[in-house]
Amino acid sequence: MSAVVRIDDYDFAPALLTGTDILAMTRAGVLPEGRGYELIEGVLVGTAAQYDPHVKMVALLLRHFARVLPDDLLVATPSIFLSENTMLEPDLAIYPIDMKSTDVRGCDLALVIEVSDTTLRSDLGKKAKLYAAHGVEHYWVIDLNAEILHRFGEPGAEGYGAKLESGFGEEIAVPVDGTTTITLADL
């Protein structure tokens, strides 16, 4: 991605950042540690603030998954470097416990979850395409307003091939071990 910007009658292409740049800027105190921004194809983008009920749902999911996941999997709220120039901040990610979050790539993720109350369009659109293009096998978007769980699978370069919707009251198999389930209404 290389955009040309016109300022004061001069064209220039802004420098694109990498994950290494983001880590260095965070360590140097240029960027705040923690959530608040993502790197999308080299461009630093601010993220929406998180408020209740979003925060509550993320906390309930973390508690639930910590209880039921196999010991070899970790549920966390990490920064995920999908490529050299794309870093996303999923609400939850499940991946092998023996991996450092900075080493996790799309194919390593058992499940990525975005909780959406104000960001549904982005989570179902741009983010779904990015996760699919980087090989994230299972991607869920929890629509808090409509109480719908959007489940995506079969990732490809153009997006996900499989898309299912479930209500919060339905028991859903969690695609990590063949036995773990979740019912969002029961959290």
Image (cartoon, rainbow, N blue to C red):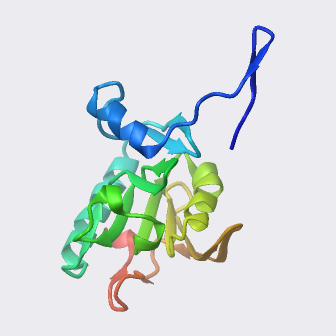
Q: Residue at x 50, y 42 (%)?
A: 39
- The one nearer the camera, 26 or 159, is 26
Look at the image and tell me whether residue 178 can be seen: yes
The spot of residue 88 in percent (x, y) is: 46, 50
Q: Residue furthest top?
A: 8
Vertical arrangement, residue 162 with respect to residue 44, above or below? below
- The one nearer the camera, 10 or 95, is 10
The spot of residue 127 in percent (x, y) is: 58, 55
Quarter the N terminus occupies: top right
Q: Residue at x 47, y 66 (%)?
A: 106
The spot of residue 47 in percent (x, y) is: 48, 38
Quarter the C terminus occupies: bottom left
* Quarter holding residue 90: bottom left
Q: Residue at x 44, y 63 (%)?
A: 113
The spot of residue 30 in percent (x, y) is: 35, 24
- The one nearer the camera, 170 or 107, is 107
* Quarter holding residue 19: top left
Look at the image and tell me whether residue 50 can be seen: no
Q: Horizontally, is 97 left or right of 51 in the view?
A: left
Q: Horizontally, is 9 left or right of 116 in the view?
A: right
Vertical arrangement, residue 52 with respect to residue 13, above or below? below
Q: Residue at x 52, y 35 (%)?
A: 44
